[in-house]
Image (cartoon, coloured by chain):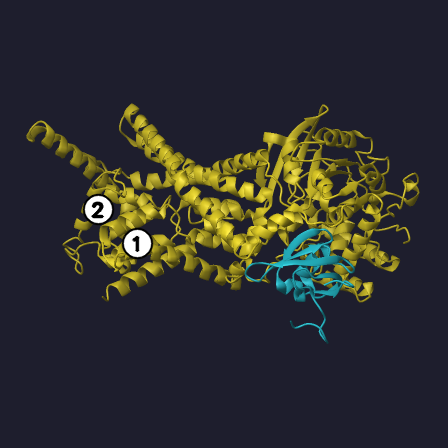
Chain colours: A cyan, B yellow
Amino acid sequence: MPTMNGHQLTLKDLQPGDEARVLRCSGDGAVFQRLCEMGFVEGAPLRMVRYAPFGDPVEVELSHYHLSLRKAEAGMIEVERRAGEG
Amino acid sequence: MQPMSSPVPRPFAPRERTRSGAPTVLVVGNPNAGKTTIFNRLTGLSQKVGNYPGVTVEKKEGERAIDGLTMRFVDLPGTYSLAAHSPDEMVAVDVLLGHQEGEPGPDLVLQIVDASNLERNLYLLSQVLELGVPVVVALNMMDIARARGIAIDAAGLSRRLGVPVVPVEGHRGRGMAELERSIARALRSPAGGRAAGAGAPPAACREPADVAGSDGPVSPPRPGAFPLDAGMEARLARLHDELAPAFEKARGRGLHSFEVLRAVVDRGGLAERRLSDALGAGCLERIEAVRRGAGGSTPLPALEARLRYAWVRQHLDGCVSRHGGPGVTWSERIDRVLTHRFLGLTIFAALMLLVFQSIFAWARPIMDAIDGAFAALGGGVEALLPEGALRSLLSDGVIAGVGMVVVFLPQILILFFFIGLLEDCGYMARAAFLMDKVMQKCGLSGKSFIPMLSGFACAVPGIMATRVIEDRRDRFATILVTPLMSCSARLPVYAIFIGTFIPRRDVIPGVLGLQAFTLFALYGLGITTAVAMAWLFRKTLLRGAKAPFVLELPSYKWPSVRGVLLRLYDRARAFLLRAGTTILAIAIVVWALAYFPRSPEIGAEIREERERILREAPEGAEMQALLAALEAREGGAYLRDSFFGRAGQAVEPVFRPLGWDWRISMAALASFPAREVIVATLGTIFGLGGEAGEESQALRDSLRRAAWPDSDPAMGGAPLFSVPAALSIMVFFALCCQCGATVATIRRETSSWGWAWFAFGYMTVLAYAGALVTYQVGMMF
């Protein structure tokens, strides 16, 4: 996994079952705004649920609901693992 | 947060009433919040479906009297936010603000909210409340929320929000009576319903003093859920005041402060574009200056989301409690199977096979019955009327044309039955989730899969099914390529030419015959061309960033039979009224082109011949046979002489390189209303009458016997159809858009003749090129 040291952890890097919290969304434009509106805001709890059978997109549980997004979009969401989990 | 003097929305203006004078209730909500279910419950069969001008958004409305008050409900497309980045998304904002052409603007907003997902659903509410329109909230899906251990204090929430909040279960109809009463009460109340609920006006119009008496934390005055700092608010207000006069002059209407807010926050969005269209690019600089003034490191959209979600949490705190912990829901259990790498894909494939089989095969007997019924009706009319133009117009033009429309209904109904079920229960989003990676390869998303698959049965329902695709570019690319899938109407064309001209030989002995291989290759040609064209369109004509694939995966639920049936009714009616009329018109024009000018010389010749037979031929079977042959020849003679026949002869040089003579050219032209018509046209033109089907041995024999005229310098006397010529015809029909219904449906779904003719044009060019290459390469062997 291209994560860990020196590299900001994003939603894309999480494995199914991992729990995390949103730090911020990067980028701009319509996709960025949509992600914010859907609830990827600072502090929001989330859990990586699964990858689609062909590896993309991914399913995420965000603040009690499920949504799917592509890895390219998941890469825009910076996260931190929730303490003691993941 | 300091109270703001401005930009408070202008007072909610009394609006022009609809013609009937009925107040307008807009039904607003997130996708999957059950908006349509409740709209259906409220309006039943009184719905009217149309399109907003210039966009592809469907406009649904219906009237209903509640407690003696007649009101008009308008169903807005589901949306997560009022930040619009496409013209389609802007429709919701325009209708809400009363800026949409032909829409009087709301007297009340009925906001549908998914109780099992309150946080995200109240985000939109926080925006709607700022518009200054009275609001009633329907807390839908209370049963699902309960099952998840979520308890909601609706009365408390109502006091906090300052609007009525009514718990309902839309799919079971529970709570509807109370909801209806609340709507009527809100509309009747003196302030036009604004002072509804606990007596407090919505946050947007409230002065701080008004909120006394509500318990708990209260909504601050506007900007309420999105409290920018005072400096920023002042800059926004100044920008509004600066732009409003010029905007009013340019557009003839006032500028709402919400539009200015959106223009500033949604960089590159529709509100910004609209301002710069009306006022020139100069105003962009001023908008940008206000953005810079926001300072801080957080971009405005992120700031908006953070503040609104904070507002939502603050309002929910204490009104919502969760118990039972985050145990595994049954929806999650189902998903473990349905999105499983092997099981999930297998079930998906089986489901798609079932859908495909049902529109492809099971619709067939009904379609044949419809064909038969209309043929019988046409026959009946023919028997009643004297021979002539009127009889032919009625039986071959009008009745055949109506039949051509109605025959699509079985496939449309079956496909939309399945789509309705799958969408209603929540599987549709999973299908898109499963297929997205595959469809990304051609620049589309998983949502394009089912429309394109339906194209194999019939492009018409497939194109209608693209409504699930929100992104305009994805949707249009899908609409443009779906007709390339080999639909069931191409089968008769393939059947007759393969059966007649492709030798019964094996490609792989005992396994694969040459005929089957040819059929397979034609289907493959359609698929590969569709994929390539979709990719090309997304790179050129419909170029643009990949649409976000941020897709909610709603909890599974039982589909509502009522909802599915209403949707069927809706689709069928929309097709018959909007596309059907166009198809009928096309059928009648094509009939006229194939009927007229009806030269008297041919009539005289035939009459003479008939008299000669009656005079000279021996009585009995032989005479009957001669007369029947003459009648068949008569049809061919008239057709050759018709405008179409003449056109066929005029364009023969164009189609010559495809190996076609004027008869084939003409039959191809005349098959514009529907591809399969070519079989009947060939039957007529080769003197067998129009009833010869693709299984007709006589038609096959005469096709085999057909030869180029002796006078032809190059081909004189040679057989008309060689294998390359037959292949060239089939390739042409695989790729062309000779289908009036498809053209009419594209026109309806895109609201534009331009796109319809573009689809026809590009497919015709492809078809010509494909047929040309096929014939020319084929002739080398």
Q: Secondary structure at mark 1?
A: helix
Q: Secondary structure at mark 2?
A: helix
Q: Nearer the viewer, residue B121 or B24?
A: B121
Q: Nearer the viewer, residue B93 or B588?
A: B93
Q: Position of residue B427 (x, y in %)?
A: 57, 47
Q: Nearer the viewer, residue B111 or B322?
A: B322
Q: Nearer the viewer, residue B105 or B623?
A: B623
Does residue B323 appear left or right of residue B466 in this picture?
Answer: right
Residue receiving disc 1:
B516
Q: Quadrant of the N terminus of chain B?
A: bottom right
In the picture, the disc for residue B700 is 2
Q: Residue at x 36, y 53 (%)?
A: B734
Does residue B200 appear left or right of residue B389 in this picture?
Answer: right
Could you give the CA–CA distance between mark 2 and mark 1, rounded to whole angstroms?
18 Å
Neighbours of disc 1 within 10 Å: few (<14), some (14-19), many (20+): some
Q: Are marks 2 and 1 on the same chain?
A: yes
Q: Position of residue A68 (x, y in %)?
A: 63, 56
Q: Residue at x 32, y 54 (%)?
A: B519
Q: Residue at x 32, y 43 (%)?
A: B677
Q: Position of residue B436 (x, y in %)?
A: 55, 57
In the picture, the disc for residue B452 is none
Q: Chain of mark 2?
A: B
